[in-house]
């Protein structure tokens, strides 16, 4: 595989683009350039990263003959992303889209439809799936080290101040759609199709920089009988935080358990009794971002299916939708109710 043949054009040069660029540089991937509607940001990022092309003309970057993958790091709102998707469709470019695909299920469906109608590849950068520690954790899970899994819990708690951010947290949906999506994607990847979900959520009124929910607890039932509890608490002022990227993961099976974080975990087995402490290299940031893009490039280069496709990611956005609807209606929501025939 010649990775240099897969030129990347980054659309959206805000804060997360720095993580993308760090990851791609570490792996020697080819970045053709970047685009952003803010001319000052374009100048700053071009100087910082020595981008070959830096422009406010988004369409021109997408149309560039060396760009084969459009890395969408622009805000996750339909009115922002739809034009980018349509330009990618117009010029036949593959799409690699920062999570969440969109905050609302119907909007996400519209974006997926644009890509499918144009016949262009679409992968969502659900980078939790590509975290080195979680990939090792998954290997033990798949190999049956803890027997048949029946329960998973992921807990994230910290205090978050978004007062200075221009758009993040300024919509009616936040902690579940923008942060919990990491964990929703991870459990869908690990445990398959979900069947139903029930959520509770709220907000700390003192977090004036955030409009939407600041804490959420979501219980998910899967078709295979697995159950999961996803806790995202960004209103925590206590002395034992579990900040993002070192959230605690617990997976229980009938022959053992996995407990730990993306940076280190322990597998306790019952048959035979043992404690396993795997060693691995790499962290969530920036390695998961690079791993995700490299996986996409390899899959496209070899003509093979890739993880986190746009169509498959609709299950994840449907879980987001189910969570908010569950709170609004005070009941458990099924996947069929959200996805209809797509379920």
Image: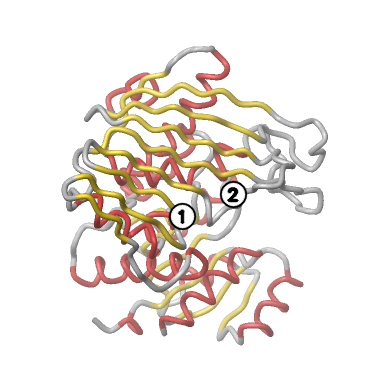
- Asked if 143 appears above or below 277 in the picture, the reply is above
Element class at badge 1: strand
- Where in the figure is residue 23, as x and y percent of width and height? 48, 74
Marks 1 and 2, the one that precedes in the sequence:
2
- Name the side, left or right, on which 24 lies relative to 306: right
Dot 2 alpha-carbon crowd within 10 angstroms: few under 14, some 14 to 19, many 20 or more: some
Residue at 43% x, 65% y: name it. Answer: 288
Farthest-out residue, top: 330
Q: Residue at x 61, y 26 (%)?
A: 201
Task: Name the image quarter holding the C terminus.
Answer: top left
Residue 151: x %, y % from top left: 33, 34
Quick check: marks 1 and 2 in contact, CB under 8 Å?
yes
On the image, the x and y values in percent for residue 56 come to 65, 69
Q: Residue at x 37, y 39 (%)?
A: 314
Q: Mark 2 points at which residue?
A: 242
| For residue 37, side relative to residue 133 (left or right) | right
Q: Is residue 129 above or below residue 224?
A: below
Figure disc tally: 2
Name the disc covering residue 57, or none: none
Quarter the N terminus occupies: bottom left
| Mark number, residue 261 | 1
The front one of 75 and 156 is 156
As rendered, which of 235 and 4 lies closer to the eye?
Answer: 235
Real-space Cα separation, disc 1 to disc 2, in angstroms: 9 Å
Dot 2 falls on a residue whose secondary structure is: loop
Way the structure is coloured? secondary structure
Answer with left or right where residue 233 lies relative to residue 133. right
């Amino acid at each position: 595989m010649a990775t240099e043949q897969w030129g990347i054009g980054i659309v959206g040069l805000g804060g997360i683009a720095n993580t993308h660029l760090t990851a791609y540089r570490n792996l020697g991937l080819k970045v053709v350039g970047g685009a952003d509607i803010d001319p000052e940001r374009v100048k700053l990022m071009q100087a910082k990263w020595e981008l070959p092309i830096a422009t406010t003309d988004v369409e021109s970057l997408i149309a560039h003959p060396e760009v084969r993958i459009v890395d969408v790091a622009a805000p996750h709102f339909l009115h922002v992303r739809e034009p980018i998707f349509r330009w990618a469709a117009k010029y036949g470019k593959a799409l690699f889209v920062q999570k969440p695909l969109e905050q609302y299920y119907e909007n996400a469906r519209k974006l997926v439809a644009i890509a499918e109608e144009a016949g262009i590849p679409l992968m969502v950068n659900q980078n939790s799936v590509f975290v080195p520690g979680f990939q090792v954790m998954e290997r033990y899970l798949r190999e049956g080290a803890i027997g048949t899994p029946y329960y998973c819990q992921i807990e994230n708690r910290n205090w978050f101040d978004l007062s200075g951010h221009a758009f993040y947290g300024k919509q009616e949906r936040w902690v579940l759609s923008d942060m919990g999506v990491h964990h929703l994607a991870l459990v869908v990847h690990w445990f398959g199709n979900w069947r139903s979900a029930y959520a509770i959520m709220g907000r700390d009124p003192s977090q004036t920089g955030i409009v939407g929910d600041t804490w959420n607890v979501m219980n998910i039932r899967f078709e295979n009988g697995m159950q999961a509890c996803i806790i995202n608490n960004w209103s925590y002022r206590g002395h034992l935080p579990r900040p993002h990227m070192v959230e605690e993961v617990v997976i229980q099976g009938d022959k053992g358990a996995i407990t730990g974080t993306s940076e280190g975990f322990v597998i306790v087995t019952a048959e035979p009794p043992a404690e396993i402490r795997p060693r691995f290299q790499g962290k969530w940031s920036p390695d998961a971002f690079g791993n995700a893009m490299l996986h996409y490039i390899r899959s496209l280069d070899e003509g093979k299916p890739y993880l986190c496709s746009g169509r498959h990611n609709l299950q994840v956005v449907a879980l987001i939708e189910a969570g908010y609807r569950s709170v609004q209606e005070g009941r458990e929501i099924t996947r069929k109710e959200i996805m209809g025939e797509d379920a």
